[in-house]
Image (cartoon, rainbow, N blue to C red):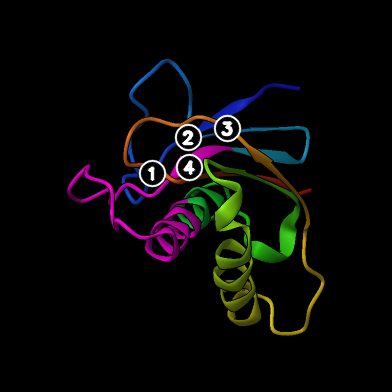
Amino acid sequence: MSKSVVRTDQAPTPIASFSQGVAKGGLLQVAGQVGFDPATGAPVGPGLTEQVEQTLRNVQSVLEAGGAGWGDVVMMRVYLTDTAHFAELNAAYDAWFAKALPEGGFPARTTVYVGLPVGLLVEIDALAVTG
């Protein structure tokens, strides 16, 4: 069973040696996405809500390039830089998924606190089942 690299110009191009997504054996792993606008290469914001929304748009673009959608996602991992942002993250995340999956069936999620490059407040990755 071979693996295939998923690429799209609708999400930021990685600045290091990793793929936007990798598919193998009916799984699609979307690499951690941040709030960069793929058209400009610059972060959106400076607020958390704007970064969460752009980050989720970037995740969605890689999912779609890999033949998946939000209904195929079984796990999301969210990396925040500040514990004080947890409530705002949940509000933005809940609003996104109320539109993306109005029938429910939300993915599992883990949230941890990390250091990210200056100006970035959130990173999100996703695991989807496509087969």
Frontmost of labels 1 and 2 is: 2
Q: Amino acid at mark 1?
A: Thr
Q: Residue furthest left?
A: 40
Mark 1 vs mark 2: which is more N-terminal? 1
Q: Is residue 47 left or right of residue 67?
A: left
Q: Secondary structure at mark 3?
A: loop
- The residue drawn where x is 65% and y is 81% is 98
Frontmost of labels 3 and 4 is: 3
Label 1 vs label 2: CA separation? 8 Å
The residue carrying mark 4 is: 33
- Residue 75: x and y, percent? 76, 49
Q: Amino acid at mark 2?
A: Gln
Mark 4 vs mark 1: which is more N-terminal? 1
Give the camera-side residue of 32 and 8. 32
Label 2 vs label 3: CA separation? 20 Å
- Residue 94: x and y, percent? 64, 73
Q: Residues within 10 Å of mark 2 (few under 14, many from 20)?
A: many
Quadrant showing the N terminus:
top right
Mark 3 vs mark 1: which is more N-terminal? 1
Q: Residues within 10 Å of mark 4 (few under 14, many from 20)?
A: many
Frontmost of labels 3 and 1 is: 3
Q: Amino acid at mark 3?
A: Val
- Residue 47: x and y, percent? 36, 60
The residue carrying mark 3 is: 114
Label 2 vs label 4: CA separation? 8 Å
The residue carrying mark 1 is: 8
The part of the image, by quadrant, that contains residue 97 is bottom right
Give the camera-side residue of 10 and 84. 84
Marks 2 & 4, CB-CB < 8 Å contact: yes
Instruction: Give the magenta-colored segment's residue range.
Output: 31-58
Q: Amino acid at mark 4?
A: Gln
